[in-house]
Amino acid sequence: MKKKRIVVKIGSSSLTNRRGEIDQEKFSDHIKAVAALRKEGHEVLLVSSGAVAAGFRQLGYPSRPVTLKGKQAAAAVGQSLLIQSYMEQLGQFEIVPAQILLTRNDFSKKKRYKNAYATIMELLERGILPIINENDTVSVEELTFGDNDMLSALVGGLVQADQLIILTDINGLYDSNPRENPFAQKFDHLVEITEEMMAGAEEAGSNVGTGGMKSKLIAARTALSLGTKVFIGQGQGDRKLIAILEGDGDGTYIGSDALLSINNSKQWIAHHSSVSGKIFVDQGAETALVSNGRSLLPAGISDVSGAFVKGDVVEVFGSNGLLGKGEVLYSIDELKRVMGKRSDEVSEEFALAPIVVIHRDTWVKA
């Protein structure tokens, strides 16, 4: 089998027992499966839930806390318990883990996004197993990933993974909730996640974690948009992850071999950047950008708005609405002076001005 880069997401319900403690039998099963996958030569990254679920009992909570301060306190206790368990059990297979705690800001800030990528790649090159979780201790509601399903999808895109495996307590996606409908039909393979599936999704997750099936659909759709195929399901035994890669997993496979990976710069622009302004273009520029894969030139710009500087991300609009967004090579004041002008006019009037306003390499379609 071709050696692959795999992101494995393990949810709280797949790590803990009903009391919220780390279930050592479940935990050991995952560790052995990861070790077997690495022994086959694959690169593995873990996105591991379980910090809050593992920590709340230690704080005296009878169940998972619902307040932000309660969740953050539980995460502060539980994260150390979780990584300690990983270190002890992975050590039996001579695997060294590295803990990486991320917040949404680590993705939204371009420099931090690049630093996270560089760190993860250095760990992989040195044979270390990255174990990634959201930094729940300091995250605030407005700046969270929502759940680790989405975090795993974004990590898969960041490292351009071949496969995202989301392990859960249900063996895949169904046309209705299998816990309520005994005649629910399972999807073995899906090419895409449709709006119809999203509209009918049931939040059928356990009461230990935060992500139900709808969150997994959203995460899968995000992963596909970044060029990463997805498996959602369950399994047992040392070879469960290998079986999934071989197409014999107990769950749902999503995506196709036609998926194209997206470079990190375009990923950041598409999914993480904040927008600082708007550019409005004529039909010729719209065709060049959307249909011909060309860069945006000053001549095709009819109007601008916002407060942006060189390097900011702006949205581009045509006659029928939003076309996409990209990194602009002018400030708004500079662009007002050159918009509508041909390239030769820009060169003559502003000797040091760039010819391109948004380069095609830093442009993503809506």
Image (cartoon, helix red, strand yellow):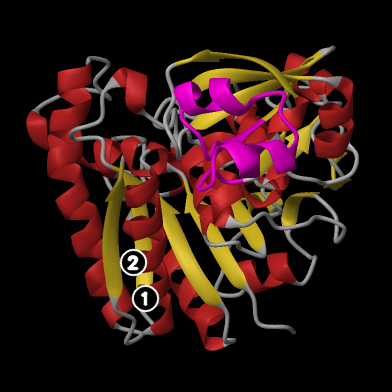
Element type where label 2 sits in the image: helix
The residue to which callout 2 is attached is 119
Q: Are marks 1 and 2 in contact (CB under 8 Å)?
A: yes
Amino acid type of the residue tagged 2 in the rendering: Thr
Residue 346 among magenta residues: yes
80 to 239, vertically: above or below: above
Q: Residue furthest left?
A: 59
Label number found at residue 122: 1
126 to 330, vertically: above or below: below
Kindly identify the residue that appears in the image at 23 percent across and 59 percent down.
83
- 18 on left or right of 327: left
- 81 on left or right of 159: left
Q: Nearer the viewer, residue 365 or 140?
A: 365
Label number found at residue 287: none
Residue 335 point in image, percent of width and height: 55, 26
Q: Magenta stretch?
A: 325-354
